[in-house]
Image: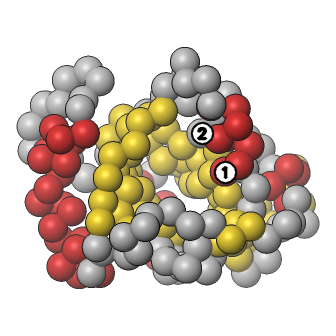
Amino acid sequence: MSGLTIFSDSEPQQPLWHSRDAEAIQRQLAEIEVRFERWQADRDLGANPQPEAVIAAYQHEIDRLVAEKGYQSWDVISMRPDNLQRETLRQKFLSEHTHGEDEVRFFVEGAGLFCLHLNGRIYQILCEKNDLISVPAHTRHWFDMGSAPNFTAIRLFDNPEGWIAHFTGDSIADAYPRLD
């Protein structure tokens, strides 16, 4: 189940707010201009869906976002616990960074933890199956896929080259809870 926990950026041990209610999460995130939605596929994807089937099942939602925001490209990424690069990739994403474009992810299956650092707070958003999150460009954040990652997600990009990170060098991510 999706969740949002808000911390002060100076008190990682004491949450200020927490909810697993999708509407409450959406309201809180809207206040900081982060888009959070729940999508449904228009067909059953079965186990271990192939990228073409994933895109086809959500094309209606992708088309809506493209028309609204002008995204230029999209793809499907999957990460499994047996990926030999999982720990290296996890460590890279755990470093606080920004992007020159929105970071848009839709979770087809599995989960990931987005942690946003803005306005003196840390917003930890547990995204699970059917969750869409759009982190605005230039927002300081990090992502935790867990020690045994298991997810499939659609990524949408403004930049045809895709994901380009600008690391801040701040070690704040080390102080906050991680995904099990």
Q: Residue 20's spot in the image, x, y percent? A: 51, 47
Q: How many marks?
A: 2
Which SS class for mark 2? loop
Q: Residue 145's spot in the image, x, y percent? A: 59, 39
- In the image, 100 versus 5, the foreground residue is 100
Res 78 → quadrant: top left
Which SS class for mark 1? helix
Q: Is residue 67 left or right of residue 176?
A: left
Q: CA distance from mark 1 to mark 2?
A: 8 Å
Q: Quadrant of the C terminus?
A: top right
Q: Is residue 157 left or right of residue 66?
A: right
- In the image, 53 versus 37, the foreground residue is 53
Q: Is residue 39 left or right of residue 4?
A: left
Residue at 19% over, 48% down: 55
The amino acid type of the residue labelled 2 equals Met
Residue linked to disc 1: 93
Disc 1 vs disc 2: Cβ atoms closer than 8 Å?
yes
Residue 32 in view, yes or no = no
Residue linked to disc 2: 145
Disc 1 packing (10 Å; few <14; some 14–19; many ≥20): some
Q: Considering only order in the chain, which callout, 2 or 1, is on the residue closer to the N terminus?
A: 1
